[in-house]
Amino acid sequence: MPVPVSVTNPNGKGLTAAMPSQLPTEGPFARLKRQAEEAATKAELSIKQETYRNPSDTIEHLVPSTSAVATAPGSIEVHHLNFAYPGLDGRPVPGIPPLLRDLSFAIAPGSTCLLLGANGAGKTTFLKVLAGKHMVPEDQVRILGRSPFHDTALTVSGELSYIGGNWQRDIAFAGTSVPLTGDFPASYMIDSIPGVDPERKARLIKVLDIDVSWRMHTVSEGQRRRVQICVGLLKPFKVLLLDEITVDLDVLGRADLMRFLKEECETRGTTIIYATHIFDGLEFWPSHIAYLASGQLRLFPAHEVPELAQGRLLSLVYRLLSEHREAELKVRGPRPVEWDPAREGEVGSFSYAFNNGWVPGTICSSLSTNAVMRT
Ligand SMILES: Nc1ncnc2c1ncn2[C@@H]1O[C@H](COP(=O)(O)OP(=O)(O)OP(=O)(O)O)[C@@H](O)[C@H]1O
């Protein structure tokens, strides 16, 4: 039987463009040398700064009041973060700009940050990078002072929690992204997390209005989501990243959850970033608004956003998205509505999807999934 190998880029333009010789590379020894040189320069610089520092110069004087900058550990810190999805050879596809471009910011502990952006702006990608699900250089993202990808204890301990996407798994011989269901009760999932404070567990079950005897194969989408959220919140996180998890919740469930999360930030100084497209009744919630567009992130403290006090968050989002769409249309013009085979493999304006085969034991191609190694 022929092996199902699919070559979907016959012209190979993307591959040719990604010739290794054209890309800057750095081996382990070159990296060590560079790091040593950087450390030496930094040490030299800090000695100079120590010598000439004005005693009244504190960090508060140096940072603009419009940012949520914090230098204390416990914050989310991002330094010149660039991120592009890799092509077939694991490197960024030449000619396609990175999805996240030179982002630098910090979020102080206790912040509740609402992440806004159009479909495809990169919110999920951004949250996954912060959650350590995509590898970026260690110094570009620091959560609680540590690299979320490299320091796996951060997620294992529950200090950093990410809840997003559908609750699903890739299962051999069944397929990718299979909803996590089975004929077992909700309590089976909830009790499977070790070392949980029983009081916190009971409180979450109450807030999320979960019946622990729900059978997971018969629950509705919203009920399954409640169990997923409960499991994600059981450990007392310090940083929580939420990717549109309230979409299936009814109005009451959503309001209760958002109140619980706000309280967590106020009482325990935790930090939350929450990406959503549902804005009604959320005006009370954010301490910051983050807006992602064209690979750039803009961060506003809530008191600088009059629409929040006026209860008009939806109209703010509407305005931001329309302005961005108009600006984008001016630059690239309308999208073509008809398939043009001449553009196959073209790099820059169109990137053909590479298909590297089929997931072993399943009938799904490996292309269709947005799954990452760490789920
Ligand atoms: N696995 C992937 N490989 C290559 N490109 C991807 C992958 N996943 C997402 N992208 C690209 O990254 C862009 C941003 O996707 P992302 O899911 O981060 O956007 P988003 O802001 O969360 O969108 P939405 O509001 O629709 O959820 C998309 O336009 C898509 O083209």
Image (cartoon, rainbow, N blue to C red):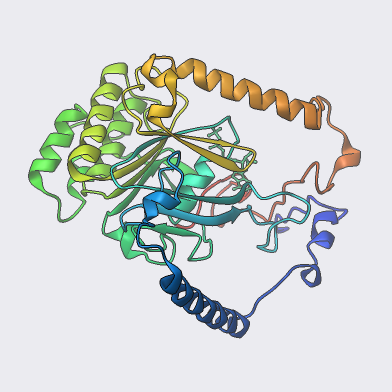
Q: Is residue 159 visible?
A: yes
Does residue 30 appear left or right of residue 278 in this picture?
Answer: right
Q: In percent of the image, x 59 and y 46: which residue is there?
A: 364
> Which residue is nearer to you in this view: 66 or 202?
66
Spot occupied by residue 301 in the image (x, y as percentages of width and height):
41, 34
Q: In percent of the image, x 26 and y 35: which residue is there?
A: 261
> Which of the four quarters of the rendered structure image does ligand 1 lie in?
top right
Q: From the viewer's perspective, is residue 105 above or below residue 315? A: below
Q: Is residue 220 visible?
A: no
Q: In percent of the image, x 17 and y 47: which residue is there?
A: 191
Spot occupied by residue 8 in the image (x, y as percentages of width and height):
78, 50
| Number of disc labels | 0
Spot occupied by residue 68 in the image (x, y as percentages of width and height):
40, 43
- Of the 4 image quadrants, the one containing the N terminus is bottom right
Spot occupied by residue 187 in the image (x, y as percentages of width and height):
18, 40
Q: From the viewer's perspective, is residue 85 above or below residue 65? A: below
Looking at this rendering, what residue extends furthest in the left direction?
199
> Which residue is nearer to you in this view: 201 or 4?
201
> Which residue is nearer to you in this view: 53 or 92?
53
Q: From the viewer's perspective, is residue 115 above or below residue 152? A: above
Does residue 354 appear left or right of residue 363 in this picture?
Answer: right
Q: Which corner quadrant of the image does residue 51 belong to? A: bottom left
